[in-house]
Amino acid sequence: MLSRRMRKSIKTIPKPALDALMNCPWRGNIRELENFIERAVILSQGEELKVPLTELKNTQTQAGTTATTFEQVERKAIIDALKEASGQISGRGGAAERLGLKCTTLQNKMKRLGVEKKDYGR
């Protein structure tokens, strides 16, 4: 459902990634897991979910820094998409399309993360 909403065609999760997700202590916080999966979907290209296992290991060993790590990954994905789209947020080939997000969702994330399109445009 999440992959469909982001216009991704993810069909498989590699066994090592699934095992790591299942063995990670999410401390009873399903939102933390949902956020991690959302970021994995954003970063994935193709039909296989790319789970950043190094980030997952950080959640296991540094429980207090999880949000910062997720924000860093999300910020990097947005910046990379903006660079590839020459600062274009909406429309065909824009950063929102590249990330599988609605334009307004991307703009809200950019504002929250302090990312400005003028820094990555032409």
Image (cartoon, rainbow, N blue to C red):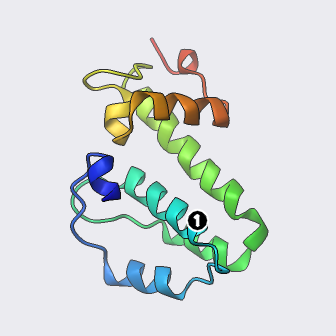
Instruction: Give the x, y percent position of residue 24.
Output: 57, 83
The residue positioned 46% from the left and 28% from the top of the image is: 104
| Horizontal relation, residue 46 to residue 122: left or right | left
Is residue 38 shown above or below 12?
A: above
Image quarter of the N terminus:
bottom left
Furthest-top residue in this view: 122
The residue positioned 64% from the left and 80% from the top of the image is: 28
Question: Amino acid under label 1?
Answer: Arg
Instruction: Give the x, y percent position of residue 33.
Output: 54, 69
Image quarter of the C terminus:
top left
Q: Judging from the image, what secondary structure is the residue with disc 1 in?
A: helix
Is residue 13 shown above or below 65?
A: below
Is residue 109 shown above or below 25?
A: above
- Label 1 belongs to which residue? 31
Pointer 1 local density, CA inside 10 Å: few below 14, some 14–19, many at least 20: few
Instruction: Give the x, y percent position of residue 13.
Output: 30, 74
